[in-house]
Image (cartoon, rainbow, N blue to C red):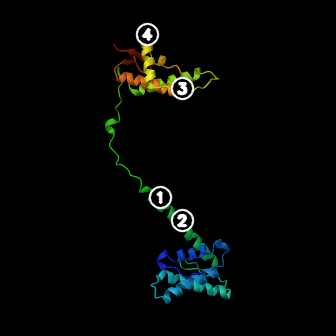
């Protein structure tokens, strides 16, 4: 293997060992660990010859690998007391497991770094105190609110859908708020006032929304008045003037 590596490129000895494993382009369980150990020790030796300041953790790992290598050479199989030190290697299998575990942590760290980078692109706003709007309801007229109209609209939509024929021919037709204002004017020009639901003839979403917005716009312009005697009663629409 090429020895052109720099110590500062690695976060620690396990990072270097993981790099050496990946250089083989093989699954870690198929790798001859003695070759990886030999390569690691060669790197440490070459850095020492170049008088490079080597971190103590790299040297501790080198000592553990030399100890493991000696056991592998003489075929020693006696179990040794477990040691939680990350640089203490008890067997070839232990070395593989430590590298695998390190890779998992490294991958997770990489994911967190990506999430952190994405989070930096998001700008947040300090929450505002909205208590002053908590109990506020926008009045239309005659004590009616937008909520009252929405409730009535939902009932109308449900009734219209129930009356729809099972087989319908779908045709695309643009329905504008301006068109519905004209339609409402025509209705009210004949009888001056009518029930809110009498303004709706179709169950399509576009038609219902356009008609609802037309009612709101005409109310805003004081062209019509909405009345309701009591809660849950029908809403009357009456032309003004």
- The residue located at (54%, 65%) in the rendering is 107
Q: Mark 3 points at which residue?
A: 173
Q: SS class of the residue under badge 4?
A: helix
Q: Is 110 drawn above or below residue 86 in the view shown?
A: above
Proximity of marks 3 and 2: CB atoms separated by less than 8 Å: no
- 157 to the left or right of 130: right
Mark 3 or mark 4: whose residue is earlier in sequence: 3
Gap between marks 1 and 2 measured at Cα: 13 Å
Mark 3 or mark 2: whose residue is earlier in sequence: 2
Which mark is in front, 3 or 1?
3
Q: Can residue 171 be seen in this view?
A: yes
Residue 105 circle label: none
Residue 190 circle label: 4
Which mark is in front, 1 or 4?
4
- Residue 224: image x %, image y %? 37, 18
In the depicted view, which residue is nearer to us: 6 or 104?
6
Q: Name the residue under label 2.
A: 107
Gap between marks 3 and 2 measured at Cα: 54 Å
Q: SS class of the residue under badge 2?
A: helix
Q: Quadrant of residue 28?
A: bottom right
Q: Callout 3: 10 Å neighbours few (<14), some, many (20+)? A: few
Gap between marks 3 and 4 measured at Cα: 26 Å
Q: Can residue 234 be seen in this view?
A: no
């Amino acid at each position: 293997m090429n020895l052109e590596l720099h110590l500062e490129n690695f976060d620690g000895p396990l990072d270097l060992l993981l790099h050496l494993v990946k250089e083989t382009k093989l699954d870690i369980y198929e790798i001859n660990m003695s070759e990886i150990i030999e390569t690691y020790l060669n790197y440490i030796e070459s850095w020492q010859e170049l008088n490079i300041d080597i971190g103590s953790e790299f040297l501790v790992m080198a000592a553990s690998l030399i100890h493991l290598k000696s056991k592998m050479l003489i075929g020693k199989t006696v179990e040794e007391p477990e040691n939680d030190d990350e640089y203490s290697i008890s067997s070839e299998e232990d070395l593989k497991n430590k590298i695998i575990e390190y890779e998992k942590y490294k991958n997770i760290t990489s994911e967190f770094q990506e999430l952190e980078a994405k989070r930096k692109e998001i700008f947040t706003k300090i929450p505002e105190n909205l208590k002053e709007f908590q109990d506020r309801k926008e009045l239309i007229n005659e004590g009616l609110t937008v909520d009252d109209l929405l409730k009535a609209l939902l009932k109308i939509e449900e009734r219209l859908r129930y009356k729809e024929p099972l087989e319908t021919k779908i045709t695309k037709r643009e329905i504008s708020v301006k068109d519905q204002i004209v339609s409402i004017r025509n209705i009210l020009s004949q009888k001056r006032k009518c029930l809110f639901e009498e303004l709706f003839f179709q169950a399509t979403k576009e038609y219902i929304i356009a008609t609802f917005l037309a009612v709101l716009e005409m109310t805003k312009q004081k062209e019509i008045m909405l009345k309701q005697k009591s809660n849950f009663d029908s809403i009357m629409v009456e032309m003004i003037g």
